Image: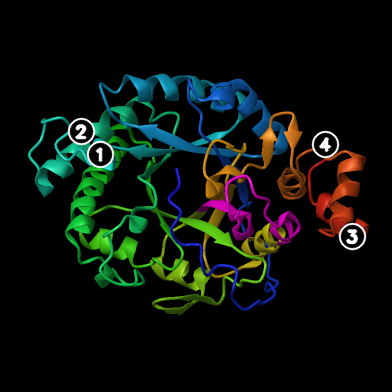
Amino acid sequence: MKTRLIRIALSLLTTVLPVAGAAAASPFVWGICGHPGPSQGLWSDYATQFSTLQRQGLKSYRFDVSLTGDGTAATQLLQPLAVLSHAHHITLHPILYVPFTWNDATDHGRYPDTEAGLEAQGYDRTYPVVLQFANDIRDWELENELSLRQGFKSGTGASASDYATDQAHRWAAVLRGMSRAVHAVSARTGKPLRVVVDTVYADFGLIPFLESQGVQVDKLAYHYYYGADTSPYRITAPGGVFDVFAEMKKIGKPVIVNELNAAEIYAPLKGRPYDDAKALVSLKTHIEYLLHQHEANIEGAEFYELYDEPGKNAAESNFGLLHDPAHPKTQWLLAAAYTCGPLTPDERTSLVAHGLFTQASLAERLAACPAQ
């Protein structure tokens, strides 16, 4: 799901305390990312994942869907997840990938290797699955972290003019087709479907560029990995210094932070420990930033991710809020304080012992939750 090329400077920036503000008119919705699949170890137990999310108070689940082959793999994944989503009141947030993701411009010879062919691939691959699940899924995310692909940007990424590359234009053609497909299904069914496209770091020119190329984007997604000493109000990037929330507001769309965790988790080598105490402080700090900012229309946030993935490299192996279903990390307990998941007396004591709350501040935090 993730491409990790942009985290070098994230822990080095100036600290600014969150600005207190009124609560948003709509409830802030918490969710999580995962990798459900029939041959994915822990991830193959869909029922456990959904019951875990519901118990924790997590309301959405973001995951990959590959639109390749004859399309049956996507259907076989989405059908059971749709059933579980209704049973557990979890909103599905699929990320769609077409063959061009894996450099197959012609989809095994079905289309010419042209922008028109790429647009047709995007449309034809997307339309059937969106139509089949239009009653179950509202938001459809198109691809993932495109601006991090090598050669995608011609500049820093902060403005639309920073995407003057052949690769960016070819990808715009793909997303133009994919977004047309989602909107065509919306028009056909009367369902208010939305196209979601993500960006990262200070690549705020991506969405304006895509829209200039005819891509229809309804909702902005943002991947949020900052350190404990970093303020989102003052992010230093090659294109300048940015207020992340102000930049989101400029784009003028509802926002979901659909990958959220601490920058400190990036371990130096596979299997080496990271500074977990600082990572916990970081996660809490940035949860508070998200809840108290009053510039962008942020609908919610999704933690990255449900389980650890020890088989991956160091930068990917430790992001789980759970080691596995039976072994939660302190990050899971911290999340529960905000998602209104269950916390035993010992777990509450652990949060206080880690310095994340005082007894009084934790009690105040939990008092905002409905009775369990």
Looking at the rendered image, the disc whose residue lies closer to the viewer, 1 or 2, is: 2
Q: Residue at x 60, y 31 (%)?
A: 89
Mark 3 to mark 4: distance in Å? 21 Å
Q: Report crowding for label 4: few under 14, some 14 to 19, many 20 or more residues within 10 A (C-alpha).
A: few
**Who comes first in sequence, dot 4 or dot 1?**
1
Residue picked out by circle 4: 372
Q: Is residue 288 left or right of residue 137?
A: right
Q: Report crowding for label 2: few under 14, some 14 to 19, many 20 or more residues within 10 A (C-alpha).
A: some
Q: Secondary structure at mark 2?
A: helix
Q: Secondary structure at mark 3?
A: loop
- Mark 4–mark 1 CB contact (< 8 Å): no
Three-letter amino acid code at disc 2? Asp
**Who comes first in sequence, dot 3 or dot 4?**
3
Query: Which is nearer the eye, 204 or 151?
Result: 151
Image location of residue 281, percent across then percent down? 73, 61
Q: Residue at x 26, y 48 (%)?
A: 175
Looking at the rendered image, the disc whose residue lies closer to the viewer, 3 or 4, is: 3
Image location of residue 205, percent across then percent down? 34, 67
Q: Secondary structure at mark 4?
A: loop
**Quarter of the view holding residue 86:** top right
**Who comes first in sequence, dot 4 or dot 2?**
2
Q: Is residue 368 left or right of residue 136?
A: right
Residue picked out by circle 1: 181
Residue segment shown in magenta? 257-281
Residue 124: image tag = 2
**Quarter of the view holding residue 226:** bottom right
Three-letter amino acid code at disc 1? Ala
